[in-house]
Amino acid sequence: MQDAFSGYHPIVNFIYFVTVIGFSMFLMHPVCLLLSFAGAVSYGICVRGRRGLHFGLFCLLPMLAVVTLLHPLFSHAGMTVLAYLPSGNPLTLESILYGVAAAFLLCTVVSWFFCYSAVMTSDKFIYLFGRLIPSLSLVLSMTLRFVPRFAAQFRAVRDAQRCIGRDLSNGTWRRRVQHAARIVSIMITWSLENAVETADSMRGRGYGLPGRTAFSVYRFEKRDGWLLAAILLCGGYVLAGSLSGGLAFWYFPVMSGEFSGLYSISVYAAYGALCMMPSVLHFIEKRSV
């Protein structure tokens, strides 16, 4: 599903995701966690559509609940004791809140990578790193491209086998093992054949020859410069605010931190603008169509 942010230059997309994922991994302030989580989930729905909504409901919510419930069972730090577990260890308010924060951090990072996989396609990755690390970029792009193709081909083969009564759920256990072995054999054959075709295609196009040029449809335009400047401005302000203590927050031994200071609010605004930037661009494009 194409959106406005995906249409920008690959360097803009890459710098944005590096910035927002980096902040999401290290900023444990509750306001920052909520802003990043809202930005990641909203953009996931924008760029993935119904699949993004299903991902949020059936993957992120269970992950959020599991991490939140498990963390207090293993971490007992904190001064506010709410109860004692059957093992005798205390159940503290700080450990529960830190578990909630850790769960949001994990779900947020996963969501941003979910968006990254939709925006940063293999051709964009090769465009950015093909000249710097040609071998590694080729291997990574081929791997990222092979996994969804393999999954799609596996589903096609499994459906075809089901139509002729050779599905994994048909027959005795011995028959099921035979059906599974047949599907695995088909997939291995397809993978080897696909590798040979890819190698022949690369050889025919002169891959590895000296002086070989590469065609690219990406051009850095004025709008890319404006968006990149906005990303760097917001990211730089958030980084400065974090280093200067505007986002200071502690969970242990007692939860404390900065919430209402004018400088902290301005940092929250900059971080919120950074996280919501792709979603805002998407809605502006939809409204103008």
Image (cartoon, rainbow, N blue to C red):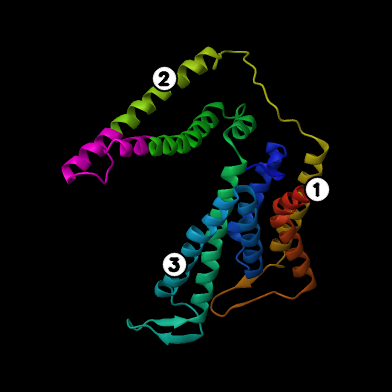
Q: Amino acid at mark 1?
A: Ser
The one of 286 and 56 positioned closer to us in this rendering: 286
What residue appears at the point 64 percent right and 57 percent down from the top-left corner? 42
Is 168 located above or below residue 218 in the figure?
below
The earlier-in-sequence mark between 2 and 1 is 2
Q: Amino acid at mark 2?
A: Val
Where is mark 2, residue-wise? 196
The one of 56 and 133 positioned closer to us in this rendering: 56
Between the residue at mark 3 and the residue at mark 1, the CA separation in whole angstroms equals 41 Å
Residue 10 lies in the magenta stretch: no
State which region is magenta: 157-183
The earlier-in-sequence mark between 3 and 1 is 3
Q: Which mark is residue 66?
A: 3
Where is mark 1, residue-wise? 288
Is 100 located above or below residue 79 in the figure?
above
Q: Residue 143, how many percent across, how many down?
A: 47, 34
Is 116 located above or below residue 203 in the figure?
below
Mark 2 crowdedness (10 Å alpha carbons): few <14, some 14-19, many ≥20: few
The dominant secondary structure in magenta is helix
Mark 3 crowdedness (10 Å alpha carbons): few <14, some 14-19, many ≥20: some
Q: Are marks 2 and 3 in contact (CB under 8 Å)?
A: no
Is 277 located above or below residue 89 in the figure?
above
Q: Residue 130, how many percent across, how many down?
A: 60, 28
SS under mark 3: helix
Q: Quadrant of residue 177?
A: top left
SS under mark 2: helix
